[in-house]
Each structure stands twice: as C-alpha cells, then as structure tokens.
Amino acid sequence: TDRLKFGPDGMLYFGQGSSTDAGTPKPGRPGERLYNASVLRIDVDNPVISIVATGLRNPFGMAFHPENGQLFTTDGGSGELGQLPDVSPVEEINWIVPGSHYGFPGCEGLPDSGNPACSGVRGPITTFIPHLTPSSIAFYTGPQAGDSANQMLVTLFKHLPGVGGDLQRFVLTGSATTGFQATRVDPSIIEFG
C-alpha cells in the first residue's frame, strides 16, 4: 500500500499498486487481485474497504485539494528503464473521480480511441515522459505560499538526461463539474537528481 490520507469526508484513503508490471504475471507470481491497481478507502469507525477508482498501476502519491476537496494522485507507469525498444507509457497525474477506471492494464497514459481497452477510460490531467516516476503530490498551502497558494507540487523520483529529479509546480484550472487541467509552472522549484 501507499501513503495514507484522510479525506474531507473523514474516510481513510490509500493507493494499492499492481502486482504485475503490465497486467501479466511473471511465471510463479500472482496476477492482479481485486484491490490491486486501485485507490481504496476505509471508514475507520466501521472498517469496510471500498474501491474508489481502478486502473492505476502505482498510485504512489495522493493529495486532496485544500479548497475543493478533490483527490489527485500520481501514477507510475509500467515498463523497465533500459528495455529496448522502450514502449513504456507516459506517467501520470490523475484527478480521481469515484467509480472511474484509469486504464491499467491495457490503456496507460492518454486514451487511444483505436484501442478497445481504452473504452471508458478517464485520461490523466497531465503526463510525464516514461520512467520519471512521479512519487509525491501535495498542495502548497500556508502563509509562505503567497501567489503560489494551492498550486500542486509533484516530485519526480528519477533523473534522466535533461529532465526529472525535481520538484515541479502546476496550476490547476477547472472544476469538478467541467474537469481539471494542470499547467506546469517553470522553472522547477528545485532540482535534486
């Protein structure tokens, strides 16, 4: 399981990654199970688990927007760095809408209308090149935020030539009614890769 967050509804939310790289288990390894590749929630007073959203390979980081209460997650895509040819999908930031499916396995990244596995898939609000591993997400709050208040902060775990290994900022626009868009703010806050 991944990071735990209490939502504005008082429920405890967490991400559960997949047990496979791309949906097919390695010999002798288990396949995907009911709660894999999902965002889950539990009422801690009545501990019954429920699935919020599916199709998220590795929802490492999650955060609730401080004003509108909407949930956003990172999602690390499948594929191994260094495999040739590299056909790994892009990695994602997703707005989590309860009951939605985000594509894993079979339709990671931006949904392709020519891929039957993409039917009904909710696409990401922004993407990163493969293998950068967006691992944490938070919203910038507090008196020090100033004009950057409520901007989304995302850490990219890996540093590839010329990109990644940094803390990036995004401005969110839209609403729960119209959908959300994320626009990157340059330069990054800090590079640590």
Image (tube, rainbow, N blue to C red):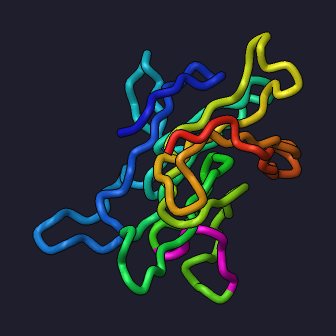
Residue at screen point 50% across, 32% down: 13
Rendered position, 83 above or below 184? below
Rendered position, 81 above or below 171? below
Q: Is residue 95 left or right of residue 73?
A: right
Total marks in image: 0
The location of residue 11, given as percent across then percent down, is 53, 24
Q: Is residue 35 magenta?
A: no
Query: In which quadrant of the rendered image does the N terminus lie?
Result: top left
Q: Quadrant of residue 8?
A: top right
Q: Is residue 130 visible?
A: yes
Q: Is residue 112 magenta?
A: yes
Residue at screen point 60% across, 85% down: 115
Report the span colored magenta: 106-113
Residue at screen point 20% across, 72% down: 26
Q: Is residue 56 visible?
A: no
Residue sitting farthest toward the left: 28
Q: Is residue 113 left or right of residue 13?
A: right
The location of residue 49, given as percent across then percent down, is 41, 36
